[in-house]
Amino acid sequence: MTIEEDAARIAAQGESAPRLARDPVNPAMINNWLEALGDENPRYVAEGVAPPAMAQVWTMGGLNWQRTADDPLGAIITVLDEAGYTSIVATNSEQNYRRLLHHSEHVASTTKLEGIVGPKRTALGEGYFVTTTTTWYVGDEVVADMLFRVLKFKPKPTQSGVLRPVVSKDTEFFWEGMKAGELRIQRWGDELRHPPGPMPPDGDLDAKPDWVVASGRGTVYSYVVHHRPAVPGKKLPFVIALVELAEGVRMLGEVLDVASVHIGQPVEVAFVKVDDELTLPAWRVIA
Amino acid sequence: MNLSGATAIAGIGATEFSKDSGRSELRLAAEAVRAALADAGLSASDVDGLVSFTMDANAEIAVARELGIPELTFFSRVHYGGGAAAATIQQAAMAVATGVADVVVAYRAFNERSGMRFGQVSSAAAGQVNSSGVDNSFHYPMGLGTPASTVAMVAQRYLHEYGATSEDFGRVAVIDRQHAATNPAAWFYGKPITLEEHQASRWITEPLHLLDCCQETDGAVALVVTSLERARDLPNPPAVVTAAAQGSGPDQYIMTSYYRDDLAALPEMGVVGRQLWTQSGLRPADVDVAVLYDHFTPYVLMQLEELGFCGRGEAPGFIAGDTLTLEGALPLNPHGGQLGEAYVHGMNGIAEAVRQVRGTAVNQVRDVSHVLVTAGTGVPTSALLLTAP
């Protein structure tokens, strides 16, 4: 079933069953609201009515609320999550108030999926706009309604993933080695070189480089603990070390699963697979 | 032909230094160049050369159009970020000394705080399809992608090799902020800091605290270079370009020269320093004021070592006490530096060097003959010696 077919099925179910507010309209909640928002309009206290913008407050689910089985927004979110549109951001909320609510009136609400539009390319990533309407009732009388729209999107890989290397003819072997689980160091005759380059130490244009597969063991030559700002694909804080490999060259990588290290700390290579095209070198402390 | 003493900086100009200029970078550039020309007593029609940084977003021809500069016979850009600062003056001086141009203006303008912030990870730097992008591929994907973290890697090794401490870095920040506190043009005017505040400031990238890192700024600075002969006839005392040098070192990278034998060093500044002393015939002891590029405090210490003010690893001892104060043996960044005044990629430091030579600085050092001013470090860099006429 496609996303569109699922959406049509959920929309065809119409309004969810009415969900009764936990409490009737009451002065305690109204007073808290007025205080929190700094609303000093005397009318609400004098006339015993609730501010219209509180409509949604009465039917909020509380801290431990679970969506009901027939909640259409929950159903379409599940469909889109499973299709990879895992992130959400609210984009529109338009409310209409039909009349004022008085103390002791007991409100119930229903929600209906109006439809989805997409996939759309947005600054946040590709996604679907999901529009629902919520209607508030007292008995059979409609007292307020709301159009609510969210964007369910796939976060752009450039925002959530690591920065990707620029690979040249001179460095391709290194990244191919990463994918194969080998830490490769460029070799010109007897000389090792990292980072690699196109020219041999002796300038012989007929020379061709090959590589050695490093033991993967080395010691920390210097390191940093990065706290700020955010770095794509990394969880803060994290440690990066410049490691002197047993073969004699230095190489940079994240040190996994530690809060810090020290200069001279023995480490060994780890291969962090980002996806099928990219594996990054990293280090683990040797206990 | 000798570059030393052939040319002078005859005019300086700047916009205000802010966090949100509210105008385009081109407008900032034009305002700064216009102010510099006014300071020099020259007009747009006198200008025949413009120089900037490759990182500057304002083409020479756009600046020329906005100001009504009719013809250019010389235009040039210098690469490597803030390392270009003093080199723009070297380019201008070489053009004037060789007769290619008569009046060359060097400028740098950006909305670096309200626009693209250099302190953040630059995916553009990581993804550039050229040799530098290939270089960065051994650093950025691994998570080392901010200027602070690239410096922190070297700073950590410096601490290890020489037994220096974070407080030694902090003393640079305290001096800069002390000087900025009495400079009304400085962002941190009236806001000195203590060493305790430096130590308590949050980590950016260990071993660098927040107060080891310079601020981010919207603003522009421009500097007018002409022959010393012509400068003598202009309203302000010339700041004579006694020496101007660029340098890159062995196995050089942009901010990540991590594969040299000696990591805790800035050999590119050593290359610059040796040229300065040779060109000018001066020695470190002849320097009356040092305007050292201070994007990050550890590199100020290492510059002092590379330039010959003290031996390798000796900077923490050298700066102890009142050495760097306005009355000290080597007054540092009297305007407050980039940590205190503004981050305009080192160009505001050159303007301060000119004011010190003229004797018109707000925090004027007494009896100034020679001022040293350096450009960004960790990258191929540059520096000047400016002298009173």
Image (spheres, coloured by chain):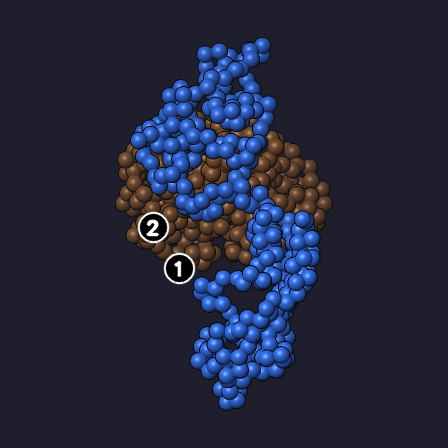
- Neighbor class of circle 1 (other Cα within 10 Å; few <14, some 14-19, many 20+) is some
How far across and down, in percent of the image, does residue A135 sit? 62, 72
How far across and down, in percent of the image, does residue A12 sit? 68, 61
* Distance between the alpha carbons at the discs numbered 2 and 1: 17 Å
Kind of residue sitting beneath label 2: His
Regarding residue B286, the answer to whether it shows in the image is no
**Res B260 label:** none
**Res B198 label:** 2
Which corner quadrant of the image does residue A267 belong to?
top left
Q: Nearer the viewer, residue B140 or A29?
A: A29
Q: Chain of mark 1?
A: B
Task: State left or right for residue A173 relative to residue A219.
Answer: right
How far across and down, in percent of the image, does residue B243 sit? 48, 34
Q: Chain of mark 2?
A: B
- Neighbor class of circle 2 (other Cα within 10 Å; few <14, some 14-19, many 20+) is many
Q: Which quadrant holds the N terminus of chain B?
A: top right
Which corner quadrant of the image does residue B73 belong to?
top right
Residue farthest to the right?
B70
Query: Residue at the location (53% across, 52% down)?
Result: B113
Kind of residue sitting beneath label 1: Gly
The brown-tinted chain is B
Query: Residue at the location (40% across, 31% down)?
Result: A283
Secondary structure found at label 2: helix
How far across and down, in percent of the image, does residue A59 sit? 52, 72
Q: Which residue is mark 1?
A: B190
Query: Residue at the location (64% across, 33% down)?
Result: B99
Query: Residue at the location (70% across, 48% down)?
Result: B65
Which corner quadrant of the image does residue B6 belong to?
top right
Q: Nearer the viewer, residue A181 or B72?
A: A181
In front of the other: label 2 or label 1?
Answer: 2
Chain A representation colour: blue
Q: Nearer the viewer, residue B351 or A224?
A: A224
